[in-house]
Amino acid sequence: MIYDYLVIRFGEITLKGKNKMNFVQKLENDVKDKLSRFSMLGIKRHFDDIEIQLNGEDADQVLSVLTRIFGIQNISSAIKVENNLDAMQDGVLRVMKAENGVRTFKIAARRKDKRFPIHGSELNQGLGAYVLKNCEGVSVDVHNPDITLRVEVGYHETRIYGHEYDGAGGLPVGTSGKVLLMLSGGIDSPVAGYLLAKRGATVEAIHFQSPPYTSDRAKQKVIDLTKKIQSFGGTVRLHLVPFTKAQLAIRDAVPEDYRITIMRRLMFRIAEKLAEKTGALALATGESLGQVASQTMESMNTINQVTDLPVLRPLITMDKLDIARIAKQIDTYEISIRPYEDCCTIFLPKAPRTKPDRLHAERFEKSFDVEALTDEAVNGIETLTVTSEDLEDAFSDLL
């Protein structure tokens, strides 16, 4: 491979005005954290990009990490040459010959250093003619080329870019505040966590477990899902809530058709108290409008009334096929369909109420001590922290 560099370009970050460099600094920190196992890399931040010098590291492995970091619009392979025409000609020819199977190309040159005597349009023509003369079987296509060879004349050197790879887009994780995700073992909530992280949210997860009705394998399933969410963002904390006593109290005191409503209201109360402790500014769920009984407009309204925090629902307009497609894309789907039940499915009523009434819910809640159960659950929370090191260990196990 001829490429010595990978160059990261920003997406939405470029629109952030005076705050742009705060976002860039956060992205640089994320890149360094995620690439920490590649000890030979050199990472240098510029005003409008981040440059990675490979120094012999495997470019494909580095790219596989970079394409999962939010805030990156695209990544280009690159070489550097001196600021003279001969070096540029040699460089574009080397890049062109390295790109196997390319039959059409376009040169796109620009001068950062306006003191360089050859204008961009002249460079396009001259370098294009040189490639045509020295590379058999290729032609110029300015509208839909197989590859665009970008030539960027800097103040001290010229970069020549080869293949361009799509980044994950979005904003750097941590630039949009913290959210507490209600993470089940299903398909939906991990996708919600992914989408929130893509918009720059720091995601912490809360999971309700009901041993002995839920197993250690169900717990491990949720831990594995948390690791997948972490692979796109920074450190993720997973809060495991003991929920057996609360569920049994609800089962014994509440009519069957209202149990899911009351259970969800209690979950929101517990999540709100935890959010106050952790500094989360919102709760989040994987709910999709009308998908199940607890996700009708009436149900969500009745459940929401127990919390003053905003409740974010990134999947609210998506159907199940859309959600499953994203789950497969981010590699959570196969984990989510492992056959281990969570607390919501174990006590699921045969015919849950789809339009629960708030006054009825409040009356049923008087049948047991809501506040005591909430406090006991919060006090019994077990917190696990998933970091990049955990993912590195998992990666090492595969080698």
Image: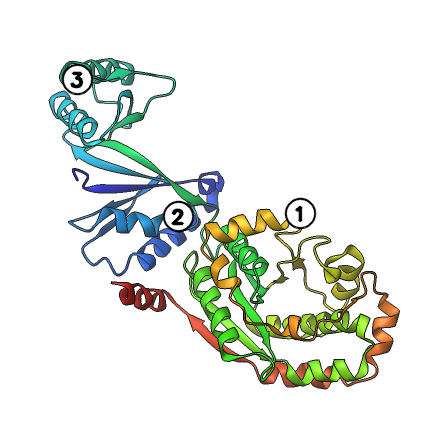
Q: Residue at x 15, y 21 (%)?
A: 85
Q: Report how far apart the C-alphas of labels 2 and 3 lie in the structure.
A: 42 Å
Question: The residue under label 2 is which amino acid type?
Answer: Val
Secondary structure type for disc 2: helix
Graded by Cα atoms within 10 Å as few (under 14), some (14 to 19) or many (20 or more), the crowding at tag 2 reads: many
Q: Say which quadrant the N terminus sits in.
A: top left
Secondary structure type for disc 1: loop
Residue 144: numbered disc: none
| Residue position marked by numbered label 3 in the rendering | 136
Q: In this view of the protein, can residue 166 be seen by the observer?
A: yes
Residue 391: quarter of image: bottom left
Residue 77 location in percent, x, y? 26, 38
Residue closest to the eye, 74 or 256: 256
**Eye-nearest disc, 3 or 1:** 3
Horizontal side of residue 73 vs 43, given as left or right = right
Q: Report how far apart the C-alphas of labels 3 and 1 lie in the structure.
A: 52 Å
Graded by Cα atoms within 10 Å as few (under 14), some (14 to 19) or many (20 or more), the crowding at tag 1 reads: few
Graded by Cα atoms within 10 Å as few (under 14), some (14 to 19) or many (20 or more), the crowding at tag 3 reads: few
| Residue position marked by numbered label 1 in the rendering | 317
- Cβ atoms under marks 1 and 2 closer than 8 Å: no
Horizontal side of residue 78 vs 303, given as left or right = left
Residue 228 location in percent, x, y? 44, 61
**Eye-nearest disc, 2 or 3:** 3
Residue 24: numbered disc: 2
Secondary structure type for disc 3: loop
Residue 265 location in percent, x, y? 73, 71
Residue 375 location in percent, x, y? 66, 83
Q: Residue at x 52, y 62 (%)?
A: 336
Give the mark nearest the N terminus, 1 or 2.
Answer: 2
Residue 207: quarter of image: bottom right
Question: The residue under label 1 is which amino acid type?
Answer: Thr
Vertical placement of residue 42 versus 119, above or below: below
